[in-house]
Image: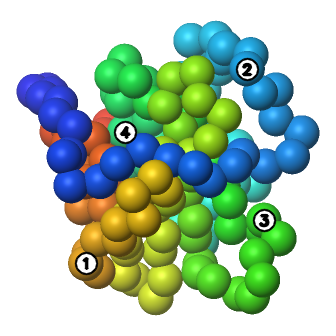
């Protein structure tokens, strides 16, 4: 499996706070980083998207991204999207990017610069704006 990594210069890093109750300032262990996503997280993702997100997370933590967080149930001022994924850089307590999915379309928002991508057709396309890698997840049989 070939893997190449590059960071997108299109989007910056950010200011979105993590959910209350997180251990801010406490480095996460590598074991925590490669765990499967909790079954209760990201309920709107289909099985293929979930597998892709797990494999993407396992790969990108080696390149400076240490956590993904389901921000969908956060206290937003109104209903905002089917899925909101907070993407966090190593050692940061604030999300660098938000990956937002609604009705089969995806967008990436830079929390620092406020830039928002054009609508994208897949979660994989959206995640590639954050950190472009080749992921070929092994599907469970």
Q: Earlier in the sequence, mark 3 or mark 4?
A: 4
Evaluate whether residue 5 shows in this view: yes
- Contact? badges 2 and 1 (CB < 8 Å): no
Number of numbered markers? 4
Q: Which residue is mark 2?
A: 25
Which residue is under mark 1?
118
Task: Estimate the x, y position of residue 91 in percent, counting from the top left.
Answer: 58, 21
Kindly report the distance in space between the C-alpha atoms of the residues bearing marks 2 and 4: 24 Å
The local crowd at label 2, few if under 14, some if 14 to 19, many if 20 or more residues have their Cα within 10 Å, is few
Whole-angstrom CA distance, mark 2 to mark 3, is 21 Å
Can residue 46 be seen here? The reply is no
Where, by quadrant of the figure, is residue 10 drawn?
A: bottom left
Q: CA distance from mark 1 to mark 3?
A: 24 Å
Secondary structure under tag 4 reads helix
Q: Which residue lies under the disc numbered 3? A: 74
| Dot in front, 4 or 1 | 1
Nearer the camera: disc 3 or disc 4: 3
Q: Is residue 96 above or below residue 76?
A: above
Q: Position of residue 58 (x, y in %)?
A: 43, 28
Circles 4 and 1: CB distance less than 8 Å? no
User: Image quarter for residue 141?
Assistant: top left
Q: Secondary structure at mark 2?
A: loop
Q: Classify 115 as above or below 135.
A: below
């Amino acid at each position: 499996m070939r893997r190449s990594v590059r960071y997108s210069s299109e989007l910056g890093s950010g200011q979105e706070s993590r959910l209350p109750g997180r251990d801010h300032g406490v480095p996460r262990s590598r074991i925590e980083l490669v765990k499967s996503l909790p079954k209760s997280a990201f309920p709107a993702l289909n099985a293929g998207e979930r597998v892709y997100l797990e494999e993407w997370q396992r790969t990108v933590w080696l390149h400076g991204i240490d956590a993904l967080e389901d921000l969908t149930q956060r206290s937003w001022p109104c209903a905002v999207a089917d899925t909101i994924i907070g993407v966090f850089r190593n050692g940061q307590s604030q999300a660098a990017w938000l990956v937002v999915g609604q009705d089969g379309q995806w967008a990436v928002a830079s929390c620092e610069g406020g830039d928002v991508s054009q609508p994208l057709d897949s979660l994989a396309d959206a995640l590639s704006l954050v950190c472009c890698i080749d992921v070929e997840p092994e599907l469970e049989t």
